[in-house]
């Protein structure tokens, strides 16, 4: 039996633009992914009989995570096994710390980490391109979270990326809720809002690497297209965004919906410290932006 372990770091989107819808129903996107230090602990063992997944941790909702075959980590492991013809058996353990259903990429981070662990253990590792090809089939966040990049500009379905140098480490406060926002629903709401509006999702945009290298430049570009439809349907999200922006410095400290929500992310980009919370969030989680990606560690037996 061989095993590997890694911290599956959460992500947030420092900007997120939803572009044209493809004929097959998928939407093109443009986003700046940023890893956070907050993460789930993922352990993968091979050389075992059968295939198992054990999830535990305070972040798991009372209703659980649903059928195992729908779990992204499980789907990642089975997809890797199909592509590499290895392993026949695996045992995965995930200790969940990332809030579930909050737009922080928890399931995607687990899936990306499973791919990284299996590739580190594989007798014949897959190329990065093949690994990203598997990740692409699992969701738009998974390719980034299967790489060793802490910050990346991504477009297409999230599978085309430009890795960037990590931003200076900053404190992050996650304002979390006891509900999630179904991503599929958020896309439907956005498509409905844009119906009949010519080129609504294709505004001209010019970015420079210098602008993406500082928190001031990031704050100037910070935006999330889902904020046009999600807060109006969830008053707690709308109230939290409004309260944080009313007292903050938007020019240097972004406040954004993460992904399609429901988590609202507050970044202390100017290092002034967070003010006492007066928001509608159910709970808050404090973490930091990641200066590096957690390494996969092979365990000795």
Image: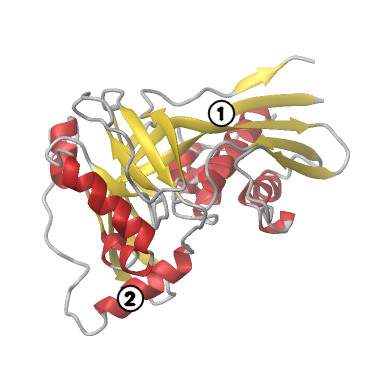
Place of residue 152 in the rendered image (x, y in percent of width and height, measured from the top left) = 32, 39
Question: In this rendering, would 296 be left or right of 45?
Answer: left
Q: Is residue 37 visible?
A: yes
Quarter of the figure that contains the N terminus: top right
Return the x and y of residue 18 as percentages of the image width and height. Answer: 29, 62
Seen in the picture, residue 242 relative to 297 is either above or below; the reply is below
Please tell me whether mark 2 sits on a helix, a strand or a loop. helix
Q: Is residue 157 above or below residue 83?
A: below
Give the residue pinned by disc 1. Answer: 7
Q: Nearer the viewer, residue 250 or 236?
A: 236
Q: Is residue 124 visible?
A: no
Quarter of the view holding residue 193? bottom left
Report the residue at 15% width, 35% height from top: 252
Quadrant location, the C terminus: top right
The residue that appears at 48% across and 31% down in the rendered structure is 38
Q: Gap between marks 2 and 1, in whole Å? A: 35 Å
Nearest the camera: 102 or 198? Answer: 102
Q: Please give the residue where the numbered disc 2 appears in the rendered image.
A: 191
């Amino acid at each position: 039996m061989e095993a590997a372990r890694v911290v599956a770091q959460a992500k947030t989107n420092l900007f997120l633009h939803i572009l044209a819808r493809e004929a097959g129903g998928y939407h093109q996107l443009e986003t700046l992914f940023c890893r956070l230090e907050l993460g789930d602990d993922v352990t993968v063992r091979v050389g075992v009989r059968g295939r198992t997944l054990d999830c535990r941790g305070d972040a798991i909702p009372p209703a659980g995570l649903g059928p195992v075959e729908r779990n992204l980590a499980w789907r990642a492991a089975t997809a890797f096994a199909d592509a590499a013809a290895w392993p026949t058996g695996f045992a995965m353990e995930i200790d969940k710390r990332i809030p579930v259903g909050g737009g922080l990429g928890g399931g995607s981070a687990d899936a990306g980490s499973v791919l990284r662990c299996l590739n580190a253990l594989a007798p014949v590792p897959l190329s990065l391109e093949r690994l990203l090809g598997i990740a692409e089939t699992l969701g738009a966040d998974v390719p980034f979270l299967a790489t060793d990049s802490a910050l990346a500009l991504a477009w297409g379905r999230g599978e085309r990326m430009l890795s960037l140098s990590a931003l200076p480490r900053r404190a992050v406060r996650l304002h979390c809720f006891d509900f999630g926002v179904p991503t599929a629903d958020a896309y439907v709401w956005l498509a409905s809002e844009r119906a009949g509006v010519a080129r609504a999702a294709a505004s001209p945009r010019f970015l420079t690497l210098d602008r993406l290298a500082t928190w001031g430049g990031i704050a100037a570009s910070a935006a999330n297209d889902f904020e046009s439809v999600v807060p109006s349907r969830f008053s707690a999200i709308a109230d939290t965004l409004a309260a944080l922006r009313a007292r903050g410095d938007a020019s240097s400290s972004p406040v954004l919906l993460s992904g399609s929500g429901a988590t609202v992310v507050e970044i202390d980009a100017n290092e002034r410290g967070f003010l006492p919370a007066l928001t509608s969030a159910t709970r808050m989680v404090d973490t930091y932006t990641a200066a590096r990606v957690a390494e996969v560690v092979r365990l000795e037996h």
